[in-house]
Amino acid sequence: MILVTGATGTVGRALVTELVGQGVAVRAVSRDPARADLPAGVEVVAADLTDPASVTPHLDGVDAVFLVWPSTDPTATASTAPELVKALALRVPRIVHLSASGAGDDPASHWGVVERAVTSAGVEWTILRPTGFAANTLMWADQIRAGDEVRWPYGEAARSLVHERDLAEVAAHALTRDGHTGARYELTGPVALTQREQVRAIGRALGRELRWTEMPRPEAVELLTGALGDASFAGIVLDGWARFVARPEPVTDTVERITGRPARPYAEWAAERVDRFR
């Protein structure tokens, strides 16, 4: 039995589908089980990770937990995440945590706080550190549906975006097979593409020519703050894109080493999601 937190999110939903396809029993955590819309046979339970007492009743018979922390606030995370991880470690022998690339560079970040809690919990652990999700580029969908222009900052920022199905497959390996304990996996797509190139790839999938227009950073801060609900985190995101202009995100072969096949290219992701941009 695998307990999947963040089960209705981008990676969590893909992981649930992957595990069900392998015949693995899944218990999915959702704040609103009635709206989860997960595959048949999945046990969906109501819980809030920031309230560990709501999670512990669902740990009976669980062999491993896929942990996605819901907050980007380091202070709030520090006050609740260690308590949750401690509760998990008392009942479950293995935790696979979805963190982020670069988490080790900023121990004070919410990612760093959760990683420390997991790695010091006294159970088997694996840390997944992906680069940006390909699915995050759905933020351009409204603009593309409305016309042929995408306005956004840092068009030359090069990212090795990773497909959520690749993350799900790696997570499934770490959750259900031995040999991954104590690993910190840096997970990327197969190549780094600039944001401008990502937009062109979406255009090719649509059979349209899309153009990039650079957005001033102050406007982007306002938009991202509204979307993320956290002005400081919006600034961190934009600072990251600024760095990727001069220093593209790295590319690793970790997905292929673990799953036995190359990471899926961004163009494949765009072709699969083409209806979301129409």
Image (cartoon, rainbow, N blue to C red):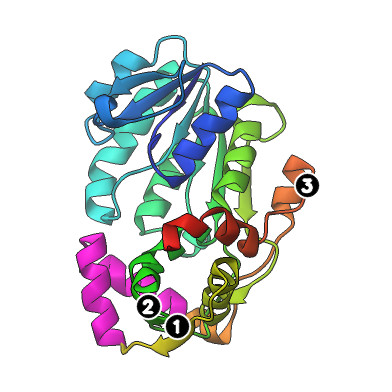
Q: Is residue 99 above or below residue 192?
A: above
Residue position marked by numbered label 1 in the rendering: 242
Residue 148, image x, y percentages: 42, 80
- Mark 2 or 1, which is nearer the eye? 2
- What is the total number of numbered labels drawn onto the structure image? 3
Q: Which residues are magenta?
A: 217-241
Residue position marked by numbered label 3 in the rendering: 261
The amino acid on which the numbered mark 3 sits, given as a three-letter code, is Arg
Kindly tell me whether residue 161 is visible in this rendering: yes
Residue position marked by numbered label 2 in the rendering: 147
Q: Is residue 216 magenta?
A: no
**What is the C-alpha distance between the residues marked 1 and 3?**
31 Å
Kindly tell me whether residue 47 is visible in this rendering: no
Disc with the residue nearer the chain's start (1 vs 3): 1
Query: Do the residues bearing badges 1 and 3 touch, measured as CB atoms within 8 Å?
Result: no
Secondary structure at numbered mark 3: loop
Q: Quadrant of residue 47?
A: top left
Q: Nearer the viewer, residue 64 or 135?
A: 135
